Image: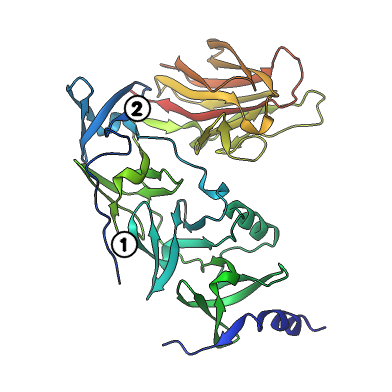
Amino acid sequence: MNIRLFVSCLILPLFAVVSVGENTATAPAAARGGSSKGMAEIILVDGETFTARPVSVGKTEAVFLTAGRTTRKVPIRDLWRIRFSDSLDLMNRPGKKVITLVGEGMVAVKSVGMSGEKITAKCDLFGDASFKMSSVATIYLPRRGRRPTGLEKRCEEMSLRNGKQDCLVAEDKKGNWIPVMGALRAVTPEKVTFRFNQTDRTVGMEYVRVIKLAKVSQKAVSPTGRIIGKDGSLVPFTSFKLAGSKLSITATGLVADAVNLPAVAEIRFRSDRFVYLSDLKSEKIVQAGLFGDTVFHYRRDRSSAGGPLRVGKKTYTKGVGMHSRCELTYDLAGKYVLFAASAGIDHASGKRGDATLKIIGDGKELLKSVKLTGQKEATPVRCDVTGVKKLTIVVGFGKDGIGVGDHVDLGEARLIKK
């Protein structure tokens, strides 16, 4: 059968022919923060932590009120994270609708619409929000009980990527996926209008699984931080302001910039005082499996098994994944004073895994061997690297002498300047 005729036979029962002929509201700010008393864990770049209520955060300085009613001022370049609570793993939440953003970022949404050249949505983090279509990469609309990550994986298996045209993926009653290339024309809670074969057609929202928007060339903008929602949403921002209970951000493509503070789990800032290890290129890599034939390669911002960096119940968006035995050497040129990370065996290993971690600077041991097992939570790692030119991180076999499950994560591994 002709492939074009075959696809048409599958598609046409789902679609009906139609003719196709800015609303932004701000979410009310709460009087309190994400915790019951508005208190948060404040984490500085060098790893110092204290508990306080954020009073104001501006361009150069943040002001906090401690539990003892003492005011503490922190330069923005020293501020790393304001943490109110834990967040969920959004892409693994069954039935959750997700909008992913170009570059990075994702937002959990309750409903999706379209107004002009904007994708509109209702969500916990912003209330009513809208995003410029050029800033939206993909819209995942899983069936009840299905996870967004499952849709993402299937798109990869089918080589469905953001290209020159929009792509709509419908699912028929038999579970067959039907990808169609064309142009997105309209979205309502009940249906999607899509143009293909020079005709506008509609498909019921219950059949739509994925919408990939065409890739648009645009100038890359480096975010200065990220907001993480309790629901797992992650939104990079370019500017940030917190005054009492009112939180506002500027983000690429985001039209509704008011943030529902009680929905925020964490605020992370990008400081010029530190650099993530995963953003640096290792100048020397030594990797060898126990028998020399099975090697799990080190990865940046992923575990050596290929999944997210996760130790225990904590997931890290930045870090390095290594496997015994592995050595990574970096040229620091004496620019840093401190190395810090959270080290542990990746969650994917279960209770398996027995490895060691050592830090060496210019041939000298800076951190004695740390034992890591699948039975332990992440271990905080800090060592002085003042003046060090060559830094080597070594993951070795543990007491068991084998490499089974030795997927070591260095979560949020970073190098800090004065």
Are the two marked residues, 1 and 2, in contact with CB atoms closer than 8 angstroms? no
Would you name the residue on which mark 1 appears? 255
228 left or right of 141 in image: left
In three-dimensional space, the C-alpha distance between marks 1 and 2, rounded to whole angstroms, equals 30 Å
Which quadrant would residue 369 be assigned to in this image?
top right
* Residue 174 at x, y percent in the picture: 73, 70
Q: In the figure, 256 relative to 183: above or below? A: above
Would you name the residue on which mark 2 appears? 43
Identity of the residue drawn at 20% across and 19% down: 68
* Residue 14 at x, y percent in the picture: 63, 80
Which quadrant would residue 402 be assigned to in this image?
top right
- Say few, some or many: other residues with alpha carbon within 10 Å of mark 1 (under 14 / 14 to 19 / 20 or more): many
Q: Earlier in the sequence, mark 1 or mark 2?
A: 2
- Residue 342's label in the rendered image is none
Identity of the residue drawn at 55% across and 15% down: 360
Identity of the residue drawn at 41% across and 72% down: 114
Q: In the figure, 363 relative to 3: above or below? A: above
Q: Amino acid at mark 1?
A: Val
